[in-house]
Amino acid sequence: MIRRRVSSLLRSAASSARSGGAAAVLAGVALAGAALLAPAIDPARAQAAFPYGQELRMDTDPMKGSKKIPVIDIADNGLAEIELWCNAVKARLIVVGDTVTVLTGPRTERQCPPERARGDDEMLAALGQTTHWRVADDLLVLSGGPRELRFRMQRN
């Protein structure tokens, strides 16, 4: 199945190259490489120390007038549910070594004050720009974006 998909992508890239699309060739080769690597990358095995299967609370104080603090609940397979300051999103965390990519889906459309909506926007932007992670004591630290995001592991 994967070989057919890769062969199809490479044929498509070659066809684009004949029609002058060098960028399409690069994209085809990149997609083919990703298709080959996708089954080999198991998020749960990519980094044993990553806090899969845990709920993490952002290491910050609540916004004025609220008790809510953002939470990331990361499943063993890298899927996550993220409660922001107001809304929520589903996400996938792809971890390889000390690098991480956070892919978020659409957010819920809850009514909220402007400062919380702005907080959601800022947090989603920071998550989208995250490139690295580390665990320090009981904190998951996500870095690479405009600011570090720190999430405390819940020890019940």
Image (spheres, rainbow, N blue to C red):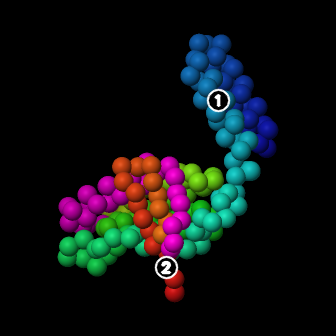
Counting the numbered discs, the total is 2
Horizontally, is 106 left or right of 47 in the view? left
Packing grade of label 1 (10 A; few <14, some 14-19, many >=20) is many
Q: Position of residue 112 (x, y in %)?
A: 24, 67
- Residue plotted at (51% across, 86% down): 156
Three-letter code, disc 1: Gly
Residue at 51%, 83% (x, y): give it. 155
Q: Which one is in front in this view, the residue at disc 2 or the one at disc 1?
A: 2
Circle 2: residue type: Gln
As measured in the structure, the alpha-carbon distance from the residue carrying label 2 to the one carrying label 1 is: 43 Å
**Is residue 123 rendered magenta in the image?**
yes
Residue 71 visible, this orientation: no
Question: How far across and how far down the image is residue 37, in percent?
Answer: 71, 44
Q: Residue at x 57, y 51 (%)?
A: 99
Name the residue carrying label 1. Answer: 28
Of 143 and 21, which appears nearest the observer? 143
Residue 8 in percent (x, y) is at 73, 31
> In the image, is residue 13 above or below residue 121?
above
Name the element at disc 2.
loop
Q: Is residue 134 left or right of residue 110?
A: right
Read off the magenta span: 110-138
The 10 Å Cα crowd at callout 2, few under 14, some 14 to 19, many 20 or more, is few
Q: Residue at x 67, y 57 (%)?
A: 46
Q: Which residue is mark 2?
A: 154
Q: Give the vertical position of 77 relative to 10 (above or below).
A: below
Quadrant of the drawing holding the N terminus: top right
Is residue 93 visible in the rendered image? The answer is: yes
Q: Is residue 155 left or right of residue 97?
A: left
